[in-house]
Each structure stands twice: as structure tokens, then as C-alpha cells.
Amino acid sequence: MQDKRKFYINVEEREISELKAGNNDEFTIYAGPNEIIALREIFEGMEHADMGTFWRSHMPFKEYHRDEDQDEYDHLLLKAYKMIYELGDDQSKQHVEQMPFFGEFNKLE
């Protein structure tokens, strides 16, 4: 069994920290090393997809609703929030439950 440690999460900045500083405490989770690695990989995937959407925005002939990078970003964002919900403290869980896409978690693998 892994030792769970307290982490502060800021999804917008894709920040994971053991130290509370500034506004990095949007969510508080308790996670082991493997879970933090998985969340970091999700955030890295979001960064990559975000860059792809940036480049798509410079192509006026490519329609938004046919943007694979945007779909990937949305999927990874949902995965990140699901993971935060599963690992989060009570306040984090309540915060995620209030989000309009909370019911979509059951559609993830």
C-alpha cells in the first residue's frame, strides 16, 4: 500500500504541489507517488493538446467542432477532475460535484 500525502492542485495552471503557495490550493488531494505521476501525465497531455488547439486557431479553414486536439483536451480535463474527485478531501469532492460535467465521469474508461 502506498503512503498518501497531501497535495495542492490548481487545474488551470496544471500545478501539483506539496506546498501551499499563492492560489495553488484550488483542490486538496491525498495521493501516492503513482497517482501523482498519473495526474502529471494527464496535465502534460492537456498541455500538448492545448498547444494543438493554439495552432488550429490559426487555420481558419479547420472547424472547431472537428478539432481532435480540443476533443483530447476536453477528455483529459474530465479525467483530471475525476481523479481529483476520487483523491480529494471533502471540500474538493463537493466542489467537483457542483460542476456541470460531474455526471460525465461514468463515461470515462
Image: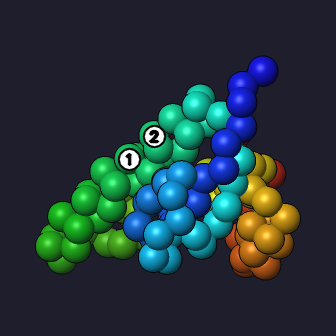
Label 1 Cα neighbours within 10 Å, binned few <14 / some 14-19 / many ≥20: some
Image quadrant holding the N terminus, namely top right
Report how far apart the C-alphas of labels 2 and 1 lie in the structure.
5 Å
**Which residue is disc 2 drawn over?**
41
Q: Do the residues bearing badges 2 and 1 touch, measured as CB atoms within 8 Å?
A: yes
Answer left or right for 9 relative to 45.
Answer: right
Q: Which of the numbered marks, if any, corresponds to residue 74?
A: none
Image quadrant holding the C terminus, namely top right
Protein image colouring:
rainbow
* Amino acid at pointer 1: Glu
Assign a secondary structure to mark 1: helix
- In the rendered image, is residue 107 in sight? no
x 40%, y 46%: residue: 45
x 71%, y 47%: residue: 30
Q: Nearer the viewer, residue 82 or 18?
A: 18
* Amino acid at pointer 2: Glu
x 77%, y 50%: residue: 86
User: Residue 41 sits in which quadrant?
Assistant: top left
x 23%, y 68%: residue: 54
- The residue at the far top in this view is 1
**Which residue is disc 1 drawn over?**
44
User: Residue 50 sits in which quadrant?
Assistant: bottom left
Label 2 Cα neighbours within 10 Å, binned few <14 / some 14-19 / many ≥20: some
Q: How far across and how far down the image is residue 24, in percent?
A: 50, 69
- In the rendered image, is residue 21 in sight? yes
Q: How far across and how far down the image is residue 44, in percent?
A: 38, 47
